[in-house]
Amino acid sequence: MQQSFNPYEMAVQQFELAADKLGLSEDMRELLRKPKRELTVNFPVRMDDGHIQMVTGYRVQHNVTRGPAKGGIRYTPEVTLDEVKALAMWMTWKCAVVGIPYGGAKGGVICDPKHMTSAELERLTRRFATEISIIIGPHSDIPAPDVNTNAQVMAWIMDTYSMDQGYSVPAVVTGKPLSIGGSEGRNDATATGVLFVTRSAAKRMEFLLQGARVSIQGFGNAGGVAARLFHNEGCKIVAVSDTSGGIYNEDGFDPAVLLRHKAEHGTLSSYSNAQHMSIHDVLEVPCDILIPAATEGVITEENADRIQARIVAEAANGPTTPEADVILFNKGCVVIPDILANAGGVTVSYFEWVQDLQSFFWDNEEITHRLEVIMNRAFDAVAEKADEYHCDMRLGANMLAIARVAESTQVRGIYP
């Protein structure tokens, strides 16, 4: 990521482009561009060797006009408040674009979980959960997994919050293990949503997914599952990358073999029978579908001209800068924006929350069907908006989402 890259500035820039098209008043822009609440906490964690380490964490609620705040918690050494603010804003638009009754939030802790034991992670998580418990809750703000967090981390948060309440509150987080109120289909939800909207885009562009070449930057949960799902759809996975670098083979990879290698060796860098390349080179290989599934700001005005894909399906949040959007749109590349493409995760999180609140659970078939209906409906609405305004799908998605949040704000009014 470039040193000068600021995710929040990019998020605001995207917002302003849509606000201009919508003709939003300056009053409404002021209400929607700034986060409702920013919480910064500094707390001690006792490490296994007995010493105390001070840790900084954030929880930002961008907007709660349409419902409780919703958004993941990430553990990385690079987390910044501006990054969390940007992700919270994108979550607001993401929930609105798929029509689920949530506002946007996000959280982050500055730490490196890859160099922490399970016991240290548990102590960090429980203390962080306690620190942010003043603003989270099943009807106020519902965290979920994100980068370097998982179902176990959510279980610790849920248990910590429940101990304080004196009874179990499964709906305080989503992405939990099934044994304590998690939902079927949650692990694959983000990648499944990416598949559904990419399928819709390919159909709209009149080309078949069968035999399409796919390159995936990022081989974590979203990227790894996407590789498997697109492979099962008949696509050829020609390139993938993880934090160690990228690999390319024009004949395609078997994702099951790659996933097994990653599990055994912890990295793809030692995989043979492939051309090795940098993480960023994976973005530029010959392919039909590019899935950035890693971090923000990786497709920029510097490399956008070298992107060869017909479709960019953003499994990551904020991978494409506004300057790159213009270049890709002008060369005929269809970018399915993050707030639409990766909304499968928050949609199934919504399903999990609803199931927890009613203590009645659905099977995987019903969840997948409901997800497909919502993702296809959202894709069609965004595509229609983009056609109406002769713009790219990101601007169309942002206009659709921002208009919905603005309408809710207008209807509710200003208190007092």
Image (spheres, rainbow, N blue to C red):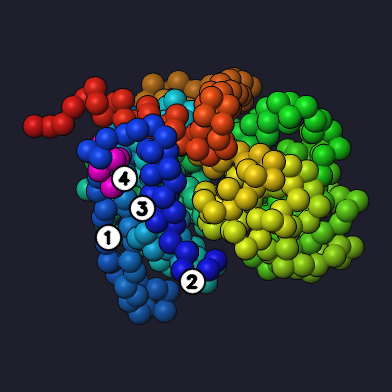
Residue at the spot 60% in from the left edge and 45% down from the top edge = 314
Residue at the spot 37% in from the left edge and 59% down from the top edge = 82
Local SS, label 3: helix
**Residue 29 falls inside the magenta stretch:** yes
Amino acid marked by disc 1: Thr
Quick one: 213 or 58, which is closer to the camera? 213
How dense is the environment of label 4, judged by Cα within 10 Å: few (below 14), some, or many (20 and up)?
some
How dense is the environment of label 1, judged by Cα within 10 Å: few (below 14), some, or many (20 and up)?
some
In the rendering, which numbered label is found on residue 3?
2
Dividing the picture into quadrants, the one containing residue 364 is top right
Quick one: 254 or 264, which is closer to the camera? 254
- Give the mark nearer the N terminus: 4 vs 1: 4
In the rendering, which numbered label is found on residue 85?
3
Local SS, label 2: loop
* Span colored in magenta: 28-35
In the rendering, which numbered label is found on residue 33?
4
Name the side, left or right, on which 77 lies relative to 52: right
How dense is the environment of label 2, judged by Cα within 10 Å: few (below 14), some, or many (20 and up)?
few
Quick one: 275 or 305, which is closer to the camera? 305
